[in-house]
Amino acid sequence: MVGYISIYVKLLFINDIKGKDMSYKILTIDTIKAYILNIPEIKSYLEDGDIEISEIGDGNVNFVYIVTNKDNQKSLIVKQAVPYLRIAGEGFPLSRERINYEIRALQFYEKLVPNLVPKIYYADEVMSLVIMQNLSKHIIMRKGLISTTYYPNFAEHISTFLAQTLFFSSSLYLDSTEKRTLIDRFNSNTELCKFTEDFVFTLPYMEDETNDINPDLLDEAKALFEENEFKKNVLKLKYIFMTQSDALLHGDLHTGSIMLNEQESYVIDPEFAFVGPFAFDIGALIANMINAYISHFYRSEGKAYQAWIIETIKEIYTQFETKFLALWAEHPNSALLKEGFIAEKELNEFKAEFMKNIFRQSIGFAGCKIARRVFGIAGVEDIRGIEDKQKRKEAELMALRIGKDLILNYEKIDSLEALIERLEVV
């Protein structure tokens, strides 16, 4: 790993200049075939045959196509960003450069955890386009959790992803020059960071036209909007999000950004990538697992499946912490530490408090991610997809109670046992 970031930045520069002789244009289902078959590595991968192209995905933000050679069944995903919010039209501008951060993050991840992210076959920042592996044998994790599918390898996979990507992009591994270079590569992703600041930490807790409030919960929404002690803690967490540059984050690591089956797990869609607090990705993932746990009080009422979700949450964090600390022990020199600077006993005490702080902040961020889904614009299918109106209301109330509790008490929750206890009694 010595000099890894320096090599990585050089590779990014090569990618930046690739395609500079052409200008940006939006590809269509009619023009995409000629474009991709003019790329030697893509033509070589697909080989000759009957090429079929179809658009997939929800189409809310980007164009996403699946390209298949019907003769040999080889396929690829082509994703292109457009300079507006596609679902709303050209009157709602959104920088297409957002996909550049996804490309850069996937390239970074591919060097560290190639088996946990889709393979990139081609990327062109000028065209705001990436061509990658088609995960045709995998599904979005949220849908698997809704249908009560067990994923025995997920905790092992995602804890490895978190430990590797967070540690190797932090000042616990990098020197100061490398860290600042990494920040320069990602922290101009201000537009999507502003989305998070607004839609995770602000608008769901106040009167705003973007909110999507269940008519049966108008009184509860009004009450939340007036809870200022709760808002004080939200502000603390928002400030950490805005100012703490610990490591490269996925930025939107929820169960809709993971595709998997019982054997494999892949992290996808890191458009929100930026250098931020260690705890944010961890908290986002925990929040989504908790939402799945809540949903099954009202979907399957499957106690065994809920127990598996709780055990998975515990395994994710326990394994993350073990792997993260092991990496730290293997790499004692960094921007932060020089070997021999501090005695082992005191260093271990420092590390223990350091990790406890990550855990506490993770719980706070998890609370925000749960609470914002109740009244905010972006609910989760786990809960909002419950068809019975009364059951959906009860699930939303439970999510609100848990989210508020974690936000109000995150600074005092310092163990997994304390977290699980709160989930079981709320």
Image (spheres, rainbow, N blue to C red):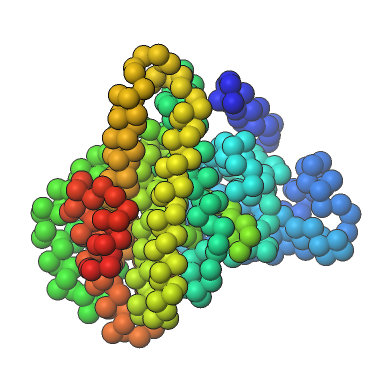
- Identity of the residue drawn at 48% across and 34% down: 326
In the image, is 396 to the left or to the right of 8? left
Which residue is rendered at x = 88% and y = 59% of the image?
49
**In the rendering, at what x and y percent does residue 202 appear?**
24, 52
Residue 324 in the image, given as x and y percentages of width and height: 45, 38
Is residue 124 something that shows in the picture? yes
As displayed, is residue 21 above or below residue 60?
Answer: above
355 vs 257, left or right, is: left
The answer to whether one can see residue 250 in this image is no
Q: Is residue 422 left or right of residue 313?
A: left
352 over 26 or under it: above or below: above
Q: Position of residue 189 (x, y in %)?
A: 43, 38
Q: Left of 8 or right of it: where is 414?
A: left
Give coordinates of residue 236: x percent, y percent. 20, 43
Q: Nearer the viewer, residue 282 or 8?
A: 282
For the N terminus, the image quarter is top right
Nearer the observer, 166 or 306: 306
42 w.r.t. 140: above or below: above
Residue occupying image coordinates x 11% and y 58%: 227
Q: Is residue 339 above or below residue 235?
A: above
